[in-house]
Image (cartoon, rainbow, N blue to C red):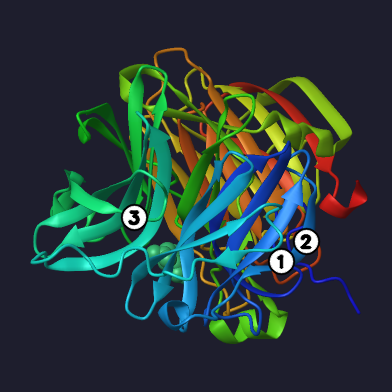
Amino acid sequence: MPMDPHRPRYHFLPPHHWMNDPNGLIQFDGLYHLFYQHNPLAAEWGRMVWGHAISRDLVHWEHLPIALAPDQLCDKDGVWSGCVVSDGATAAAFYTGVNPEVQCLATSQDLLAWEKYAGNPIIAAPPDGMAVTGFRDPYVWRAGGLWHMLVGSGIRDVGGAALLYQSPDLHTWTYRHPICVGDRARSGEMWECPNLFPLGDKWVLMVSPFGRTIYFTGTYADDRFTPDYQGEIDLGGCFYAPQVFRDDDGRRIMFGWLFEWRDKAAQLAAGWAGVQSLPRVLSLGAEGRLHFAPAPEVETLRRRHTHHPELRLLPGGDLVPGISGDQLELSLTLHLRQANRVGVRVAVSPDGAEETRIIYDRQAGVIGLDTTRASLDRASHGDLHAAPLTLRNDEPLRLRVFLDHSVLEVYANDITCLTGRLYPSRSDSRTVSLFTDRPATATLDAWELASMEEG
Ligand code: DQQ
C-alpha cells in the first residue's frame, strides 16, 4: 500500500480510526500512560472508549488494548473524558459515562485490566437546582487529606463553571460549590475538560469552551480560584481539550487533541482522524503568562542537521536555504532590524501554487499561520489564524516549527503557540523558504525528524 502522505509519523495517533481528547495522563511505575477518546470502529466520532498507549520517553509509544469501553448502564452510550490518579499501588480512573452525563470510577493495579466500580455512577446528577450547560470530564487530585474533583460545567446564560466535589475515599463524593464561574462573553458558557494545578507561585485553571482552550492564572485558596490573567493555550485553530499532568521530575506536561481540517469523507477514506500534539512543558512567565516548550525528549528524533549561522534576508524574493521535507524541525532566530513583515514558508511547491506561511507583523503585533493556500485539494479547509505577539525593541523573533506531514506546530518566543493542519495535494510541496519586507538576518537550524517507529 502506498504511504499515506498526510498521516503524521512522529505525533501520536492510534493505528486506525478516530481519536480525540487525551485522557488519564499519568506516569505510573516510571512509565508514561496516554489514554485517549477513541472510536475503534470508524474514523469518525461515535460510541467512545478509552484507547491506551505507553511510553518510556513521551515520544515513542506502544499501542495497548482498549482500557475502558461501555459495559455498564451508566456508560452505555460512551466512556467520555477523564483522568487517572494513583492511590498507593492502585490506579483510579474517573470518567464521564453517558447518557445522561454522570461521573464513574474504575480501578486497576496494572493500568491494563480495569474493574469498574459496581456502585457507579459515583456522581449521578448535577447539583440540584443548577441550570447546567453540561456535566463532564472529571479532574481529580489529592490535597489536605481529601480527594478533590472538578467537573466541567457551566451555568446557562451566565458562563462556564468548574464544580468542586470532595471525597475521603474516592467513592463517596459531596458537592461543595463552583471554584470559579466565568463570564459567558469572555470565556464561553460551557467549560469542557477542566485542569487545575500549581505552577511557580500561581495556580492555573485551564478549560475548553468549545473549539478553543483558555487558561487563567491566579490564586487558589479556601477551595476558590480567583483569576488574575486570562490567556490562550494555542491559537492555531485545531488544538483542543488538552490535559496536563505532573511527571516524576515535577514537570507539568500537556498533550492536546489536534483535530482534522478536511471533509468527513476524506477522513473516512483515510481511515484515521485526530492526532495528539507533541508533549509541551509548561512554565510560568512574567505577568502570569504561561510559557510553552516542546519536551526536550522530542530532540531524540533529530536526524540530518543543517546549520545556517547568518542568513541575509532581502525584500523582493524568498531566501531558499536548501531545506525541504515533510518531517522537519526548524529553529529560527530572526533579527528584524528595519523589517516589519517577516516569515517562513513551508511545504512550498516549485511553482508556489501550494504553500503554508508563518508571518510575523511587527506593527500589528501579530503572528499568523496561513494555510489558505496549503492545498489545491478542495476537501481540506485552510484558514488564517493569528495570535498577539509583541517583541521588545530589538528582541528577535524566535520560532520552533515542527512539520509532520499534515501537522504544523509553531512555538513563538515561548509564549505563543499556533498549531494547524495542512494537506498538500502535490508530492513536491516540500520546500522551506524565508521572506521579509526589509533587510533582516536570521540564524537557522533544521533537522529531519525520525518517525516514531524508527526507534
Ligand atoms: N470530548 C469528550 C467529552 C469532552 C469532549 C467526548 C471534548 O468528554 O467534553 O468525546 O472534546
Q: Where does residue 90 sit, x and y in percent of width and height? A: 61, 47
Which residue sits at x=76%, y=46%?
A: 55
Marks 1/2: CA–CA distance: 7 Å
How far, Cα to Cα, is label 2 from label 3? 33 Å
Q: Which residue is mark 2?
A: 63
User: Element at badge 1?
Assistant: loop
For mark 1, does the 10 Å Cα neighbourhood hold few (<14), some (14 to 19), or many (20 or more) residues? many
Q: Position of residue 307 (x, y in %)?
A: 82, 25
Compared to 13, does 413 lie above or below?
above
Q: Which mark is residue 357?
A: none
For badge 3, the amino acid type reads Thr
Do we see residue 316 in this rendering?
no
Look at the image and tell me whether residue 385 can be seen: yes
CB within 8 Å, label 1 to label 2 = yes
Amino acid type at circle 1 is Pro
> Seen in the image, is 137 located left or right of residue 333?
left
The residue pinned by badge 1 equals 14
Q: Position of residue 314 (x, y in %)?
A: 62, 29
Residue that carries the numbered disc 3 in the rendered image: 172
Crowd around label 2: few <14 · some 14–19 · many ≥20 (10 Å): some
Residue 278 vertical placement versus 152 (above, below): above
Q: CA distance from mark 1 to mark 3?
A: 34 Å
2 or 3: mark nearer the eye: 3
Q: 363 or 266, which lies in front?
A: 266
Q: Secondary structure at mark 2?
A: strand
Q: Earlier in the sequence, mark 1 or mark 3?
A: 1
The percent position of residue 332, horizontal first and vertical second, equals 65, 28
Task: Give the class, few, some or many, for how many residues have Cα within 10 Å of label 3's Cα (few <14, many ≥20).
Answer: few
Q: Is residue 230 left or right of residue 194?
A: left
